[in-house]
C-alpha cells in the first residue's frame, strides 16, 4: 500500500491520510533528508544550488507534515494525536541537529564569502543572511568551553520555563470557592452562572464554583456585585505562584525569575551581545532597545493624561452609584462595565443579526477586490477534512495566485481560537516550476442553527478580517524562495502588520456597508447602531494603552538593564515602571510578574512591545488610505507591492518606509484610539 504522505500532491489528500502512516512517513523523509544533507556537504554545490537543494528537502517535509499538523488541530482524534506526538520529537531532534550543524554553517559562510554571493537576487541574499544569523544565534559558532556552557544554559532555561508555567498552572488550579446559591454571584450573566454551576457539578458539589481560570475570574471581576467576593478573587489571582496570598510560598516563581534573568544575560553575553534585549532584537524590526524605549515612553507621555481622566471619571461614577470613596483594584473592571453599558448600550449579540457569515465573506472578498484587484472564488474540492471546510482560489486577470482553505465554525475536537497557517509556500522548484502558495484559515464561529445562516458578532467579523490579512501576506507574495516568501522570515514585531491593517475595514462605514445585511431584511447596519459601535470602540482606551505600556516597558527594561551582582530587584523595577506610566497602583501584595508567562514561559522576552509596535505600523499604514481614500486602488496596489508582495525578503523597516515614504509615526495609532482628536472633528 502506498503512503499518501510520501506522494507529491499539490492539494493534500486530507481524507486519505491514515494516522498510522504518519510516523513511518516522517521517519522516512527525515532519513532521506539526512542522507541527502550528508551527500551535499561532502561536496557542496556552488552558489545558490546548495540552498535550492536544502529548500527542496524542507519543502517535501513540510508538504507531508503540514496537513498532519493541521488535522491534529481541527479534527483531533486519539489516533491523530498519537501520530502527531510520535512524530513531533523526531522533527525537533532533526531541526536541533540542523541548527547545530557546523559543516552546514561553514557551507553558508563559504557561500556568503564567495564570488557568487553578490550575483544572488536580493531575496536570495536575505535567505543566506538569515541563515547565518540564525546559526550564530543558535550558538553553532561557539567553540570549546563557551559552546558547552551555551548548551547547559539552553537546557536550564528550557527547564525553568516549563517550571514557571507549571507553577502558574498549579497555583491557578489550587484555589477555588464554592458559593451556596446564585444570589452570592448577583450581577453575573446567565452564561457565566451556568459555567459556575457546571464547575461545581463536576466536583460533585451543589452550588456555584468560582475558579481562577480566566473566564471565571473575568466574569467575577466584571460583573459580581459583591465587593468582598471581588476582593477575595482578585487577591488569589494577583498573587498566584508568589510569596503572597492564600497559597503564599507554595509555587513561588520569584527564584525562577531571578535565575532565568541571570542565565539570559549570560547567554546573550556568550553570543556577543551586551544584554538580552539586544539579543532578542537581533531578529526583530526595531533597531535597538533605546529605540523601543523611546517609542513606549512617547506613547505613555501622550496617553497618560487621557488615562488619568478616564480613571477620574470611573472613580466619580463609582462614588455616585455606590458612594465608593476610592477605587480598589477589584473595582476597576466592575465599574468600567457598568459605565460602558450606561453610555453606549451596544451588545455584540444585538449586532449578530446584521452579520450573516456569507454576507460578511462576500463583502470581505469585494473589499480586497477593490483594494488589490484580486478575485476570490470558491473551488470545488473533494476529500477535505470536514464538510464545513471550503477551498477558495485567488486570481487576477485569470491567472491563479494561490489558494486557501477556510474552516469557519466551532465544533468538538477542534482547537479553539482563530489562526492562519501555511499549507504550501510559494517557491521556484528545482525543476524550475513555480509552486503556488496555499493557506489554512481557521476560525471558531458559532455554526448555523437549522435553516438560519451562521450569524457573527462584530468581534468575530474583526477576527475573520485579521486572519484574512495574514492570509493575504502569505498568498500575495511574489517571492520565489520559501525561506522569505509570504510570512516566512518576517520579523516578529512586524508580522501582525497586514492582519491588524485589514481589520480597519470592519470599522469603516463604507466597509461595513459591504459586509453587513440584516439576516431577514437585508438592511445594512443602521447608522445609529454604527455610531454607538464606533464610540464604544475607544471606551477607556487610554487606560488600556498605559496598561500595555507598563507591561512592555517592564519587560524591556528588565532584559536591558539587568545587572548580575547585586542582582536586579525585579519588584523594585516593576514599581518604578508603574510610577512612570501607570495611572493606578495595584495593592502592595500584587505579584503580577510571577504569572507573566508571556516573557518567562513564552517567546515574548524583550518582545512584549511587539503588540504595540505592530499596532502602530498598521495604524500608520492605514492612515495613508485615510489620506488618499480608503478604497483607493493605487494606494492598495502600493501596499500590495511594498508590503504583501515582498514578505520577508527585505528588512521590515525598509518595506514600511517604501510604502509610507517615511518612518512610522504614532499619530494615527493615538488618533484611532481616540487619545488625540479625530481629523476634522470639532473640539
Ligand atoms: Zn495575528
Image (tube, grey):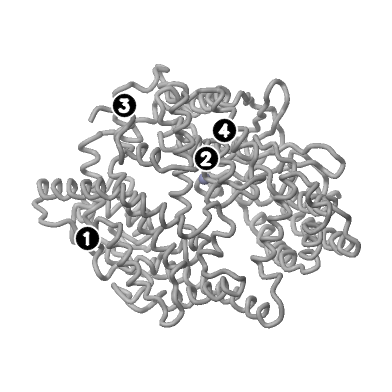
N-term-proximal mark, 4 vs 2: 2
Q: Quick check: marks 1 and 3 in contact, CB under 8 Å?
A: no
Badge 4: residue crowd in 10 Å (few <14, some 14–19, many ≥20): many
Give SS at disc 2. helix
Instruction: Give the residue pinned by disc 4.
Output: 639
Q: Nearer the viewer, residue 636 or 420?
A: 636
N-term-proximal mark, 2 vs 3: 2
Give SS at disc 1. helix
Q: In the drawing, what numbered circle is on residue 229?
A: 1
Q: Quadrant of residue 385?
A: top right
- Give the residue displayed 30% in from the left and 46% down from the top: 542
Instruction: Give the residue pinned by disc 2.
Output: 499
- Give the residue displayed 46% in from the left and 61% down from the top: 598
Badge 2: residue crowd in 10 Å (few <14, some 14–19, many ≥20): many
Q: Nearer the viewer, mark 4 or mark 1?
A: 4
Instruction: Give the residue pinned by disc 3.
Output: 680
Left/right of residue 78 with respect to residue 542 in the rendered view? right
Amino acid at each position: 500500500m502506498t503512503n499518501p504522505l510520501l506522494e507529491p500532491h499539490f492539494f493534500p489528500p486530507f481524507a486519505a491520510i491514515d494516522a498510522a502512516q504518519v510516523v513511518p512517513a516522517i521517519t522516512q523523509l527525515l532519513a532521506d533528508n539526512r542522507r541527502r544533507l550528508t551527500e551535499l556537504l561532502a561536496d557542496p554545490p556552488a552558489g545558490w544550488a546548495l540552498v535550492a537543494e536544502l529548500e527542496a528537502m524542507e519543502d517535501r517535509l513540510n508538504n507531508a507534515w503540514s496537513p498532519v499538523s493541521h488535522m491534529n488541530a481541527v479534527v483531533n482524534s486519539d489516533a491523530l494525536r498519537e501520530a502527531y506526538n510520535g512524530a513531533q520529537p523526531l522533527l525537533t531532534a532533526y531541526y536541533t541537529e540542523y541548527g547545530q550543524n557546523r559543516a552546514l554553517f561553514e557551507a553558508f559562510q563559504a557561500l556568503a564569502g564567495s564570488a557568487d554571493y553578490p550575483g544572488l537576487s536580493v531575496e536570495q541574499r536575505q535567505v543566506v543572511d538569515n541563515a547565518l544569523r540564525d546559526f550564530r544565534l543558535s550558538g553553532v559558532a561557539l567553540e570549546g568551553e563557551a559552546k558547552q556552557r551555551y548548551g547547559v544554559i539552553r537546557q536550564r532555561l528550557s527547564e525553568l520555563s516549563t517550571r514557571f508555567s507549571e507553577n502558574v498552572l498549579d497555583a491557578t488550579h489550587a484555589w477555588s470557592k464554592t458559593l451556596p446559591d446564585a444570589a452570592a454571584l448577583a450581577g453575573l450573566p446567565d452564561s457565566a452562572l451556568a459555567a459556575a454551576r457546571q464547575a461545581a457539578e463536576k466536583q460533585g458539589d451543589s452550588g456555584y464554583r468560582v475558579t481562577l481560570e480566566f473566564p471565571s475570574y473575568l466574569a467575577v471581576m466584571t460583573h459580581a456585585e459583591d465587593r468582598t467576593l471581588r476582593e477575595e478573587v482578585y487577591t488569589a489571582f494577583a498573587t498566584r505562584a508568589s510569596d503572597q496570598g492564600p497559597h503564599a510560598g507554595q509555587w513561588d516563581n520569584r527564584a525562577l525569575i531571578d535565575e532565568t534573568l541571570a542565565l539570559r544575560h549570560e547567554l546573550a553575553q556568550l553570543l556577543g551581545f551586551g544584554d538580552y534585549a539586544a539579543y532578542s532584537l537581533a531578529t526583530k524590526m526595531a533597531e535597538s532597545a533605546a529605540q523601543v524605549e523611546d517609542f513606549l515612553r512617547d506613547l505613555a507621555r501622550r496617553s497618560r493624561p487621557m488615562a488619568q481622566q478616564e480613571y477620574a471619571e470611573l472613580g466619580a461614577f463609582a462614588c455616585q452609584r455606590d458612594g465608593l470613596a476610592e477605587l480598589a483594584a477589584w473595582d476597576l473592571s466592575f465599574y468600567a462595565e457598568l459605565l460602558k453599558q450606561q453610555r453606549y448600550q451596544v451588545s455584540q449579540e444585538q449586532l449578530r443579526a446584521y452579520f450573516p457569515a456569507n454576507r460578511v465573506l462576500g463583502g470581505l472578498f469585494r473589499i480586497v477586490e477593490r483594494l488589490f484587484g484580486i478575485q476570490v472564488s470558491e473551488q470545488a474540492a473533494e476529500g477535505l477534512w470536514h464538510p464545513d471546510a471550503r477551498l477558495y482560489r485567488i486570481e487576477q486577470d485569470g491567472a491563479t495566485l494561490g489558494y486557501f482553505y477556510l474552516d469557519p465554525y466551532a465544533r468538538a475536537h477542534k482547537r479553539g481560537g482563530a489562526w492562519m497557517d501555511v499549507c504550501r509556500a510559494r517557491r521556484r522548484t528545482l525543476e524550475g516550476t513555480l509552486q503556488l502558495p496555499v493557506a489554512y484559515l481557521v476560525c471558531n464561529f458559532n455554526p448555523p442553527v437549522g435553516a438560519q445562516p451562521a450569524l457573527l458578532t462584530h468581534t468575530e467579523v474583526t477576527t475573520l478580517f485579521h486572519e484574512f490579512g495574514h492570509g493575504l501576506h502569505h498568498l500575495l507574495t511574489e517571492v520565489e524562495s520559501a525561506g522569505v516568501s509570504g510570512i516566512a522570515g518576517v520579523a516578529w514585531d512586524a508580522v501582525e502588520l497586514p492582519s491588524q491593517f485589514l481589520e480597519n475595514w470592519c470599522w469603516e462605514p463604507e466597509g461595513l456597508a459591504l459586509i453587513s445585511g440584516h439576516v431577514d431584511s437585508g438592511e445594512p447596519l443602521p447608522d445609529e447602531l454604527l455610531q454607538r459601535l464606533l464610540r464604544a470602540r475607544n471606551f477607556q482606551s487610554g487606560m488600556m494603552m498605559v496598561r500595555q505600556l507598563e507591561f512592555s516597558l517592564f519587560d524591556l527594561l528588565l532584559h536591558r538593564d539587568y545587572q548580575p551582582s547585586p542582582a536586579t530587584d525585579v519588584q523594585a523595577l516593576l514599581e518604578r515602571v508603574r510610577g512612570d506610566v501607570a495611572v493606578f497602583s495595584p495593592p502592595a501584595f500584587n505579584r503580577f510578574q510571577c504569572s507573566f508567562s508571556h516573557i518567562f514561559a513564552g517567546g515574548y522576552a524583550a518582545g512584549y512591545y511587539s503588540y504595540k509596535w505592530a499596532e502602530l505600523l498598521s495604524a500608520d499604514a492605514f492612515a495613508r488610505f485615510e489620506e488618499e481614500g480608503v478604497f483607493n486602488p493605487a494606494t492598495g496596489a502600493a501596499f500590495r507591492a511594498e508590503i504583501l508582495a515582498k514578505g520577508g525578503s527585505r528588512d521590515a523597516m525598509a518595506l514600511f518606509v517604501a510604502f509610507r515614504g517615511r518612518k512610522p509615526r504614532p499619530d494615527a495609532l493615538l488618533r484611532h484610539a481616540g487619545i488625540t482628536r479625530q481629523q476634522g472633528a470639532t473640539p
